[in-house]
Each structure stands twice: as C-alpha cells, then as structure tokens.
Amino acid sequence: MSITPSPYGFARYLGRDENHDTLAARNTRLSRGQVIAVEIKRSEQNGSFQRFHVPYEPRMRVLDALNWISENEAPDLAYRWICGSKMCGTCGVRMNGREVLACWEAVEPEMKIEPLRNLPVLRDLVVDRTPFEKKVASFEPWIERRKNYTEFPEALTHKEMKDAAKALDCIGCMCCYSACPVIRLGAVTDFAGPAPLVQLGQTALDPRNDPAKIKRSLTQTGIFNCVSCYKCEEVCPAHIPIVSQVIEPLKTKTARLLPHLAKHSLALRAVVAARGRVDPTALLLRVQGLRVLAKIPRALRLLVRGKIDPIKTFIRVKTAAYAAAHRILSKGPELE
Ligand code: SF4
Ligand code: SF4
Ligand code: FES
C-alpha cells in the first residue's frame, strides 16, 4: 500500500492520516464492480476458509465486504461491530495476516479474514473478550486519591499527564493483544498483555493515584515478560506508543515500587553501568547468587562454547563505552 504524504503534515491525529492512506489505496487499486476475493475462517466449518466474491464499491471497507457477504451469501456469518467509526473497538479482525479494524481498513483485491488470535473464538470472527475484561477488572481500574481536590478544574501539567493521556486513546480493540508473541506462549508466563497494560496505564500513570493502589495492580502484571518487540505498537489503530509511553513507564514504576519484581532488569542495568557491556557471568551471579553453584555443569558447557569468560568478569574488564554507559545508567535511584 503506497502512503501518500498527509495533508496534515506528519502530525499524528487520530483517524486523519490513515483515512488519507486508505482513500489513496481505494482510488488507485480498485474500480467499481471489480470482484474482490474474500476468504473467511468459519468455525462452523471446522475452521476452514470459505470463499466469497464481493463486487467492489468506492470507499469500501472490510466491514462493508462482511456486510455484503452476510446480506447476500452467508446470513449465518458471525462478526461484531457497533459504531462503524473507530470508536467502540469491537470490529478487530486479522486481514491478510495483520490485525485491523474492519470498520476502518480499506478492502484489498484478495483478503483472508480470520478472528483475532490469543482469545477464544466464540463463532467465526467473534472472539471472547472475557480474559481481557477479567484482567482489567483485577487491576481495579480507577483512581484512589491521596489528596482532595484543591480546585476545579484541577491544575495538571502536560508533563505529568503525557503518558496517561496517550493510554486514554485506547478503544480496547484487542489488536495489540492478538499481535503479542508473549501472550501467544499461553500459561508459560503470567504476562497480562499489552491491551490490559494500556488500560492500567490510564490510572497507574496518573500522578493523582495512590502508590499503594498502583503497587497492588502492578504486582499482577508480569510486566517484565514483555520483550519490547513493538509488534503491539505496529498494529494499534489508535497509534498509541504502547511500548515507549505505557509499558516502559510502567516497568520503571514497577522497578521503583516493587524492586524485587525487577531484579533481572536492575541487575542488567547495574552490570552495563559498571562495565559498559553485557557480562553474562556477572549478570548470572547478581541474579542467582549462590544458587549458581547448582548449575556448574551448565556453566561449564557455556564456558566450552565460549559464551562466558569468567576471567574478564573477575578482573572487571570495561569497554570504551563504559564512561557513557555509566553516566547514562547510573542516574536512576533504583540502580543497585
Ligand atoms: S512489545 Fe511487549 S507487549 Fe508489545 S507485542 Fe512485544 S512482548 Fe507483547
Ligand atoms: S492499545 Fe491500541 S491496539 Fe491495543 S486495545 Fe488499545 S487501541 Fe487497540
Ligand atoms: S465498529 Fe466500532 S471500532 Fe469498528
């Protein structure tokens, strides 16, 4: 899909840039009456794909194609939508392998449409949002104030609210949750996932919230399982900087309020600050302490393969990056 420069410059306004992009796609790639091939995953047919041929109409969205199919060829097709205008977050699906909002995405000449991943499928394209809703409810998504209002409206600076304000753009579409590879691992981790974390960010990153309450919520996030792969950000239709402005600030808050949960990250930061490099042996010793003795056979295997170098660790070899790494990384109060 070619991206035409936005008439609004490079500023990101919700809806404007992508509307321009999809209009450009519609105008250049398809003409009225051209037949679009649509394959839809049908749970009623043991998860196989059913093929439909839909006549293109100008400004056609994925949702319009689904409506046409439901009205003309498959009245039993199950899909979900409410607002039709990128507000309610109910119409998320996977189209040609990526998460999109059906009501916002322009049709493609050939489309393979599936339900979102990482959530149980109720029927066809409809997924069960209960795991997400339960997780969000367990975070107690409200603000418990420590001080009463001093004035109304309350004076809050942009700096104080910048992260929470980004999270407030979330429409709960679950596209990010479907794209997250760590959620895909299932019960291997206790990671809450990007969508619940963005919901948590709305209150946990608000400076008026009580830290004791934030601590209670953060304990349940498994946030350090996030591998910062940015897959969630790539698909977010609201353009929320999920990793840089929600997950990273929440990780920082967790490291301050609950340092025992951030042991590995803090140890890594301390090692890099002290040596200007990642030193696997020093990292292992900091995280595992004397428990490392139980893993001597494994350590020997790593030594043979050249993965660790205890001599460099014990004489504390530093790299040329040490001064810069120390200056940048030793500032945080949470550093060991
Ligand atoms: S950055 Fe974290 S939350 Fe986002 S997709 Fe990757 S692992 Fe999941
Ligand atoms: S963060 Fe973005 S992708 Fe995730 S639920 Fe909210 S709006 Fe959807
Ligand atoms: S139908 Fe509401 S966001 Fe798509």
Image (cartoon, helix red, strand yellow):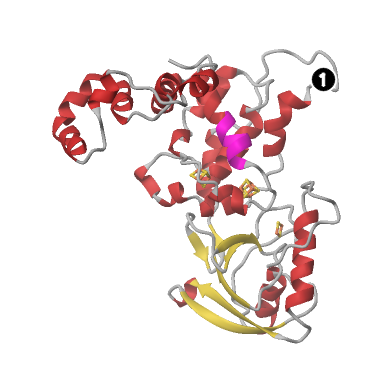
Q: Name the residue under label 1.
A: 155
Q: Is the magenta stretch mostly helix, strand or loop?
A: helix
For this view, does 237 lie left or right of residue 261? right
Is 5 or 325 nearer to us in this picture?
Answer: 325
Residue 79 magenta? no
Q: In this view, does 108 lie above or below 7?
A: below
Residue 243 magenta? yes
Q: Quadrant of residue 270?
A: top left
Q: Is residue 68 above or below residue 187?
A: below
- Tally the numbered discs: 1
Q: In which quarter of the image is residue 296?
A: top left
Q: Is residue 156 above or below residue 194?
A: above
Amino acid at dot 1? Ala
Q: Quadrant of the N terminus?
A: bottom right
Q: Quadrant of the C terminus?
A: top left
The percent coordinates of residue 138 (x first, y second) are: 52, 34
Q: Which residue is drawn at 85% across and 23% down?
A: 153
The percent coordinates of residue 116 (x first, y second) are: 54, 60
Q: In which quarter of the image is residue 271?
A: top left
Element type at marker 1?
A: loop
Would residue 309 be visible to someone looking at this image? yes
The percent coordinates of residue 137 (x first, y second) are: 56, 37
The percent coordinates of residue 228 (x first, y second) are: 50, 41
Q: What stretch is highlighted in magenta?
A: 242-249
